[in-house]
Image: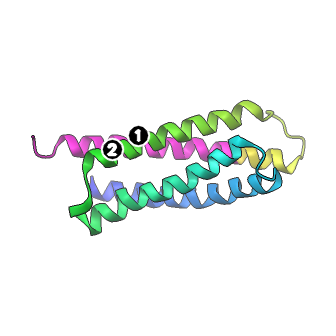
Amino acid sequence: MEGISTIVHAVLVLFLIIELGLTAYLVSISHGHESRFNFMLFNSLWTLVVIVYTGLVKRALSSLYHGIVGLALLAITAMFWFAGSIAIAAKIPIHCHGVHSCQVAQATTAFGFFIWAIATALAVIEGLASRGGSRV
């Protein structure tokens, strides 16, 4: 599972960089007045911190890593992404008719759902790994 987890973390970081750029643009053009865009920007930054813990700390500083904490962080992250993606999807139209900010919001929603799926998969992987560990 370690190899799969590393690949999934790498894909997640790539998607997070794209999502960070999209949401930062939306926050910029809305001047910070759209809370759903602000929340998705928070999600991007939050997930980067969670990935540092579940990816880097787990491998480099394993004495500081706890499986249940990693599982909880990933589960919360998945819920955040689902909520944020739904919040944006509920407000944007299906057809943007060439409106750039609308198209960016659509891309943000799509990447948000991809990141939600990846965070959910990582939570499942973490749950299976922590379940197979030592019994207390």
Q: Which residue is mark 2?
A: 71
Image location (x, y in percent) of residue 74: 40, 45
Which residue carries the number 1 mark?
Answer: 75
Residue 65 quadrant:
bottom left
Q: Residues within 10 Å of mark 1 (few under 14, many from 20)?
A: many
| Chief SS of the magenta region | helix
Q: Position of residue 82 (x, y in %)?
A: 55, 36
Magenta-tinted stretch: 108-136
- Most foreground residue, 132 or 66: 66
Judge whether residue 19 is colored magenta.
no
Q: Amino acid at mark 2?
A: Leu
- SS class, disc 1: helix
Count all numbered tags in the image, as a single digit: 2
Residue at 45% x, 45% y: name it.
Answer: 119
Residue occupying the point 69% across, 53% down:
23
- Nearer to me, 57 or 11: 57
Amino acid carrying label 1: it is Ala
Q: Is residue 115 above or below residue 95?
A: below
User: What is the spatial separation of the Cα atoms under label 1 and label 2, in whole angstroms?
Assistant: 6 Å
| Left or right of 97 in this view: 39 | left
